[in-house]
Amino acid sequence: MVIREALFTSLDNEPLRFEDERGWLEVLYENEDLVLKRSFSKSGVFRGLHWQRPPAGQIKIIRVVSGAIMDVVVDMTDTSRDIRTMHIDASSGWICIPENAAHGFYAREDTIFEYVCHGAYRPDCEVALSVEPWLRTNLGDAGLILSAKDMAAQPLEAFRA
């Protein structure tokens, strides 16, 4: 009977919501192994590049609910630090970002984005990496919106594990 009750436990707690000029982020569910988030980003917003180093790696499973993004990943085990991109929209379905990848995205239009993280958020293990020069070269200066945290991040090319 305990198993049956556990299977039907409600998860209807209020999400944590953070808002700023870029849009908002909701933490819908979080425990020590799993985080479910939803965000809204205005067109021109870049969120990232973020990575959690071991021992607190996170696997992220992402999708675009509405809108379109340019997804940006860097394999942190590859010293070349090549930036890889993929255009994703609501028709793309769920995509897995492995724990060795730093991740971010550029909102090509107003976008609702969801992600499931396997592994808890650990700010002591988080690394923020700046790819601002690359973004400006590839996207232009017009309308690029970054958070203060992302503007202050260390340059990707300077990062040493």
Image (cartoon, grey):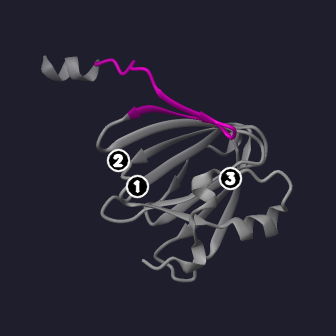
Q: Is residue 124 left or right of residue 133?
A: left
Q: Which residue is mark 1?
A: 58
149 shown above or below 11: below
Magenta stretch containing residue 158, yes or no? no
21 shown above or below 158: above
Mark 3 residue type: Leu
| Cα–Cα span, label 3 and label 1 | 23 Å
Mark 2 residue type: Ala
The residue under the point 51% across, 79% down is 78
Residue nearest the observer in this picture, 85 or 161:
161
Q: Position of residue 59 (x, y in %)?
A: 43, 54
Label 3 SS: loop
Mark 1 residue type: Gln
Q: Which residue is mark 3?
A: 146
Image: magenta residue range: 9-29
Residue nearest the observer in this picture, 54 or 92:
54
- Contact between marks 1 and 2 (CB within 8 A): the answer is yes
For marks 3 and 1 on the same chain, the one whose residue lies earlier in the sequence: 1
Task: Choose mark 3 or mark 2, whichever is in front.
Answer: 3
Label 3: few (<14), some or many (≥20) within 10 Å?
Answer: some
